């Protein structure tokens, strides 16, 4: 089993599992599933989307990319099977009553082991540029562990802070990865000059949400992380504008990345402003979660899985442009649901369910299209 093509690189099993599980879990939540007695309601939903769905894609991307960044062998075989097993165990126990603590152990081990595997390549090659990525992956696991510690303590208000902390850690990865790839991919495809970013701007897009995430775990005035979120979001908006070229709009493989990065930036600003206007919290978090994370993860899953299976990057394979549009619709309806909740519970429910259907449909189309590609060897005969 460990030598099967699906375990040749981390993106293969984890992209497929994340797509399938993301669709299942969002439909369950949208149509009434309320979790378990010890991981109930929105705690279950947010936990599974942040550290389950998004966590799998972040780990898959980083463990795949680090082989290129460091010229070291990729994670494959037994270590990858072990990693996938930890992720599956965490998802299984999240559904079983009174075993949330086991989900916490398995999920935290998943991120720590992933950080160790990535760190092996980074430190062996002395690839100092990616030390921050290893540290961020480890901190992502710490936010997961913190959530479960607070959950076990029975303090219903504190896990919300750790949930938001986990969400902000994904914003950190969006800042880290987006800054490296979006301008580069744009210039390569459109034949334009790559837009350079000063080091302070690059560091700010990564460090501001990361620091915000850590501060949310500490007993400090929430105004401080809120201001950092707003600053990070404004910088992200500036970056999106700086990188943009007219030709982006005619290429789905590019505009999906811009849309995801820009949504994440807008969501950070709104989430930061929710300190002064709490009704904005749901809107901000879901613009990040569906618009930022949903769009950008889908765009990267489509793109990286093409390159690493020996297929051309352009044009987007059918029906991937449709999946991008479906995720945009999911963002629109989930944002509308956040605005409708104080006005009409019926309208809120309908909008929430439409968002869940569109989100799930996008991921299921991806799973259907990519399943044969990610479970068979590369078309060019190269390893990976």
Image: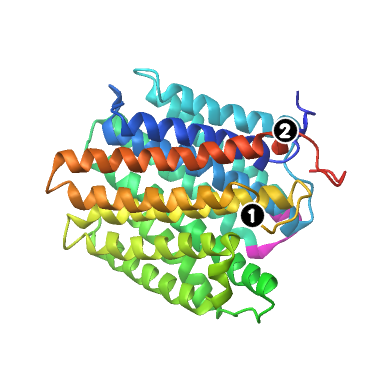
Is 340 contained in the magenta span?
A: no
Binning the other alpha carbons within 10 Å of mark 1 as few (below 14), some (14 to 19) or many (20 upward) gives some
Residue 338 position within the rendered picture, expressed as x and y whole percent measured from the top left: 24, 50
User: Which residue has dot 2 on it?
Assistant: 375
Q: State the count of labels.
A: 2
Image quadrant where one finds the C terminus:
top right
Residue at horizontal 29%, vertical 53%?
A: 335
The x, y position of residue 348, in whole percent, is 21, 43
At 50% from the left and 59% from the top, the residue drawn is: 174
Residue 217 appears in the rendering = no
Mark 2 Cα within 10 Å, few/some/many (few <14, many 20+)?
some
Q: Which residues are magenta?
A: 122-129
Q: Residue at x 45, y 30 (%)?
A: 24
- Residue 125 among magenta residues: yes
Q: Nearer the viewer, residue 9 or 351?
A: 351
Q: Main secondary structure of the magenta part?
A: helix
Q: Nearer the viewer, residue 58 or 30?
A: 30
Would residue 44 be found to the left or right of residue 15 on screen?
left
Residue placed most toward the observer, 19 or 321: 321
Q: Quadrant of the N terminus?
A: top right
- Residue 189 is left or right of residue 239, and the answer is right
Q: Position of residue 352 (x, y in %)?
A: 29, 41
Of mark 1 and mark 2, the one earlier in the sequence is 1
Going by the image, does 221 lie left or right of 104?
A: left
Distance in Å between CA atoms under marks 1 and 2: 20 Å
Residue at 60% in and 48% down: 301
Numbered tag placed on residue 74 in the rendering: none
The residue beneath circle 1 is 316
């Amino acid at each position: 089993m460990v030598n099967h093509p699906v375990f040749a690189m981390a993106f293969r099993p984890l992209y497929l599992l994340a797509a399938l599980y993301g669709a299942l879990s969002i439909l369950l939540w949208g149509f009434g599933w309320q979790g378990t007695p010890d991981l109930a309601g929105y705690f279950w939903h947010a936990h599974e989307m942040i550290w389950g769905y998004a966590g799998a894609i972040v780990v898959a991307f980083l463990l795949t990319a680090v082989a290129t960044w460091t010229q070291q062998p990729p994670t494959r075989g037994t270590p990858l099977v072990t990693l996938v097993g930890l992720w599956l165990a965490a998802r299984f126990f999240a559904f079983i009553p009174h075993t949330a603590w086991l989900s916490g152990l398995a999920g935290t081990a998943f991120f720590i082991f992933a950080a160790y595997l990535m760190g092996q390549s980074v430190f062996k090659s002395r690839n100092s540029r990616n030390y921050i990525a290893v540290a961020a992956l480890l901190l992502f696991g710490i936010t997961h562990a913190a959530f479960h510690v607070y959950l076990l303590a029975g303090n219903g208000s504190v896990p919300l802070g750790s949930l938001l902390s986990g969400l902000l850690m994904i914003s950190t990865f969006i800042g880290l990865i987006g800054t490296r790839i979006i301008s580069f991919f744009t210039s390569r495809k459109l034949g334009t000059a790559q837009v350079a970013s000063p080091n302070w701007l690059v560091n700010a897009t990564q460090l501001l949400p990361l620091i915000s995430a850590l501060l949310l775990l500490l007993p400090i005035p929430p105004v401080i992380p809120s201001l950092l979120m707003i600053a990070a979001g404004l910088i992200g908006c500036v970056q999106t504008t700086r990188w943009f070229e007219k030709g982006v709009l005619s290429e789905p493989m590019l505009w999906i990345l811009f849309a995801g990065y820009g949504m994440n930036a807008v969501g950070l600003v709104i989430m930061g402003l929710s300190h002064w206007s709490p009704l904005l919290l749901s809107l901000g978090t879901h613009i990040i979660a569906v618009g930022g994370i949903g769009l950008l993860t889908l765009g990267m899953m489509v793109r990286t899985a093409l390159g690493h299976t020996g297929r051309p990057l352009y044009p987007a394979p059918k029906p991937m442009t449709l999946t991008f549009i479906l995720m945009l619709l999911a963002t629109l309806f989930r944002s509308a649901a956040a605005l409708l909740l104080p006005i009409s519970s019926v309208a809120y429910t309908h909008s929430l369910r439409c968002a869940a259907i569109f989100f799930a449909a996008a991921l299921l189309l991806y799973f259907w299209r990519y399943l044969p590609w990610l479970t068979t060897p590369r078309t060019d005969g190269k390893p990976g």
